[in-house]
Amino acid sequence: MYAADLGRFIREETGNYFGICVAGYPNGHPDCTTFEDDLKYLKEKIDAGADFIITQLFFESEIFINFVYKCREIGITCPIIPGILPIQSYASLRHLMKLSKIKPPDNIINEIELNKNDDGAIRAFGISHATKMCIEILQSKCTSGLHFYTLNQEIATIEILKNLGMWNAPVRIKPWLMSANERRANERTRPI
């Protein structure tokens, strides 16, 4: 019925064959009675066999850093990876707020409201804001990695990684020989 039950079942049935990741809520799970209770349930998931935590989205680096500190305080020692969501449009932010039940701080809402009809301006703000959060989180040394919620829109994540100096353009190795067909000889991609 609960994530801890599933983790325990996987460990009992398969040993260490699988790596298990569980969700953490830096703002506290929206349906949990208190933040402390939510941390207690997270600890149960780890004690049941989870290997690491990826957090749900949050909008301020201090929220994540404090979350890690509180987890360490109660004995959670596994890696905790921040779930970063670059804000990319007015509609997607409103939809995510509804789904996650998490409200961004007023300064972010005000910035988004000012540009609600300009997705380019919102994306630029989202990239800048997420980059700043990532820098602060990495400088805190409370995590060794980042997880990005791309929502199938990789452009903002690539820009953030470039801003952080972490982007290396992928080298595409083609698993086929060049076509003998002259019209297809210069193709960059082709179905296999």
Image: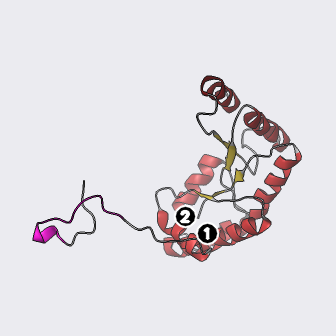
How crowded pointer 1 is (Cα within 10 Å; few <14, some 14-19, many 20+) is rated as many
Residue sitting at x 60%, y 69%: 126
Q: Is residue 168 left or right of residue 110?
A: left
Q: Disc 2 marks which amino acid?
A: Tyr
Residue receiving disc 1:
112
Confirm or deny contact between disc 1 and disc 2 (CB under 8 A). yes
Q: Secondary structure at mark 1?
A: helix
Q: CA distance from mark 1 to mark 2?
A: 7 Å
Residue sitting at x 46%, y 57%: 152
Label 1 vs 2, first from the N-terminus: 2
Q: Secondary structure at mark 2?
A: helix
Question: Where does the image place residue 127, in percent across and percent down from the top left?
Answer: 59, 71
Q: Is residue 34 above or below residue 140?
A: above
Quarter holding the N terminus is top right
Residue sitting at x 64%, y 25%: 9
In the image, residue 53 lies in the stretch drawn in magenta:
no
Question: Where does the image place residue 154, in percent across and percent down from the top left?
Answer: 48, 63
Q: Is residue 192 above or below residue 43?
A: below
In this view of the protein, which residue sits in the foreground, 2 or 106?
A: 2
Residue 93 in sight in this render: yes
Q: Main secondary structure of the magenta part?
A: loop
Residue receiving disc 2:
90
Image-quadrant location for residue 138: bottom right
What range is drawn magenta here? 173-185
